[in-house]
Amino acid sequence: MTISSPRPLEQRIADTRARFDADMDAWVATAGAGGPALVPLSFDWDGKTFVISTLPRSVTARNMAENGRVRLAFGPTRDVVVVDGVAELVPAGEVDAVADAYAAHTDWDPRRESEEYAWYRVTPRRIQAWREADELRGRDVMKDGAWLG
Amino acid sequence: MTISSPRPLEQRIADTRARFDADMDAWVATAGAGGPALVPLSFDWDGKTFVISTLPRSVTARNMAENGRVRLAFGPTRDVVVVDGVAELVPAGEVDAVADAYAAHTDWDPRRESEEYAWYRVTPRRIQAWREADELRGRDVMKDGAWLG
């Protein structure tokens, strides 16, 4: 599983983008007055931002409403991508288009649930990608919202 | 992968304990003034508490020093165990015994690194275990520090 030499930046960016396209779930960490929240949520990636959906009364939703700060983690613990991003509620007029794309990617349509879900767009500001200790150096692949490659 | 009927409590507890014994890494979420932190860390489980180790200057260490609140996640996103716990610094006199057990379980001994690592004991207060949506009900397997089974 371990590759002997650290991947160069371009490879990390390509692997990261491929994971965003292929994966269905991410770990979503938020912070509020009650401490850290952390749950797995399905996501859709449109090439620039992530869309996630959760119940408005969930701790995650309340934390995002409070401060908008989100950290997402993808992949197994030895092939990691982590994203620091800013969450915003998707405006009501955009929900249907966003939800269609989300359902196509995740095979789950929250609009069909009995409770009403809220929709959030997460814009990445920083992205890091590493496998094991030898890749900790050079793990930044996006800073200040811009890919480094 | 999906089992058609939700696992009963006793099975969830057994699966959860088996995962704590077998797994090497967990996702560690903490919260501080800067928002949420989330990193994968190796852990050791002694049957009652988790031991983790990180650099004292890391955001995770600073958050734990600030408020002691930790949320740990184990497993893939569709066979989840999450733990809300309280982190405390391991007293200096106990570090060697704790570090020996940690190194035996994780195959990594932070005492051999050039930088000095800090050691934390995380005591679980609440544990939840679920696979897919049909298992969200009944996901509590520990409350107030006591196994429910």
Image (tube, coloured by chain):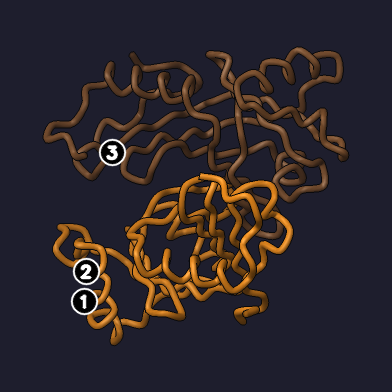
Chain colours: A brown, B orange
Residue at 65% in and 78% down: B148
What secondary structure is marked by label 1? helix
- B146 left or right of A95? left
Label 2: state its secondary structure: helix
Question: In front here: A71 or A2?
Answer: A2
Indicate whether B116 appears above or below A2: below
Instruction: Determine the CA span between mark 1 and mark 2.
Output: 5 Å
Q: Residue furthest front?
A: B4
Q: Which residue is mark 1?
A: B100
- What's under tag 1, amino acid-wise? Asp
Q: Chain of mark 2?
A: B
Chain hosting mark 3: A
Relative to residue A34, is residue B96 drawn left or right?
Answer: left
Q: Chain of mark 1?
A: B
Residue A42, position as x, y percentages in the image: 61, 34
Amino acid type of the residue tagged 3 in the rendering: Arg
Same chain check for tags 1 and 3:
no
Where disc 3 sits, the SS reads loop
Which is nearer the eye, A107 or A39? A107
Residue A118 coordinates in the image, percent (x, y): 80, 33
* Contact, mark 1 vs mark 2 (Cβ under 8 Å): yes
- Provide the residue designation for mark 2: B103
Quadrant containing the C terminus of chain A is top left
Contact between labelled residues 2 and 3, with CB atoms less than 8 Å apart: no
Q: Which residue is mark 3?
A: A131
Left or right: where B62 falls relative to A86? left
Residue at screen point 42% across, 64% down: B19
Residue at left 57%, top 31%?
A: A85
Callout count: 3
Q: CA distance from mark 3 to mark 2?
A: 20 Å
Q: How crowded is the residue under tag 2: few (<14 C-alpha within 10 Å), some, or many (20+)?
A: some
Can residue A66 be seen in this snapshot? yes
